[in-house]
Image (tube, rainbow, N blue to C red):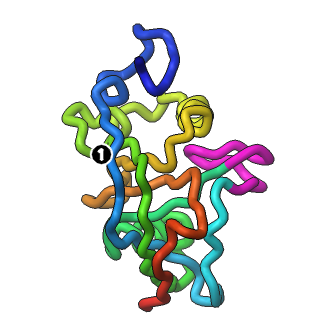
Amino acid sequence: MDVIQWPKELVPDAVRNAELKPIDTPLFRATSPDISSLSLNAPRVPGYDTRLGVRGLFAPLYFSGDKKTAENEYLYHFPEFPCALWKVEITISKCLDLASQQDRFLLRDHYFPWQFFAACILGAKIEAVQFQSYRGAGANYAIFHLSERAVKDVKKIK
């Protein structure tokens, strides 16, 4: 049975062939240097639309798999501001891995229905999605469900 229920002819190969895997590795997030503690509430209710979030309904927390990708993502959105870097050690049992797919449809297809996809992820109780960054060589993670027991450590490293 498919994890995400949508018409078979609309399912990109990368989603059809994706696997659920655990994450037990440090992730990174860049923020404004003024932030003194990192909020890890997921899902959250945003005041704006994001790639995998809908204003007023839900949004994941975004992380990167390495420091450079986290900084690149932040500086793309806020080029005029300096950034701080956080290292977060978490354990996630169900992450949908789209970064390892050969066709890399997420990089090529800007018209992919991201927000519909996110709603399916929430409905399937998948905790996170890993996808290739648009801003660098690394992977990004959109975390939809994060319990307190999943967070092992949070450190501001820069």
> Circle 1 sits in a helix, a strand or a loop, which is it?
loop
Q: Residues within 10 Å of mark 1 (few under 14, many from 20)?
A: many
The location of residue 13, given as percent across then percent down, is 30, 22
Is residue 16 covered in magenta?
no
Q: Residue at x 43, y 57 (%)?
A: 92
The location of residue 136, given as percent across then percent down, is 30, 60
Vertical position of residue 17 compared to residue 82: above or below: above
The location of residue 68, given as percent across then percent down, is 32, 73
The location of residue 82, given as percent across then percent down, is 52, 85
The magenta region covers 44-58
Q: Left or right? Give the position of 47 relative to 111.
A: right
Vertical position of residue 17 compared to residue 73: above or below: above
Q: Which quadrant is the N terminus positioned in?
A: top left
Q: Residue furthest front?
A: 149
Q: Residue at x 51, y 16 (%)?
A: 6
Is residue 53 covered in magenta?
yes
Q: Residue at x 32, y 70 (%)?
A: 66
Q: Residue 19 or 60: which is nearer the viewer?
A: 19
Q: Main secondary structure of the magenta part?
A: loop
Question: Which kind of residue does numbered mark 1 sit on?
Answer: Ala
Q: Which quadrant is the C terminus positioned in?
A: bottom left
Q: Left or right? Give the position of 64 relative to 79.
A: left
Q: Left or right? Give the position of 120 relative to 88.
A: right
Image quarter for residue 35?
bottom right
Q: Residue at x 19, y 35 (%)?
A: 102
In the picture of the structure, the residue carrying the numbered disc 1 is 99
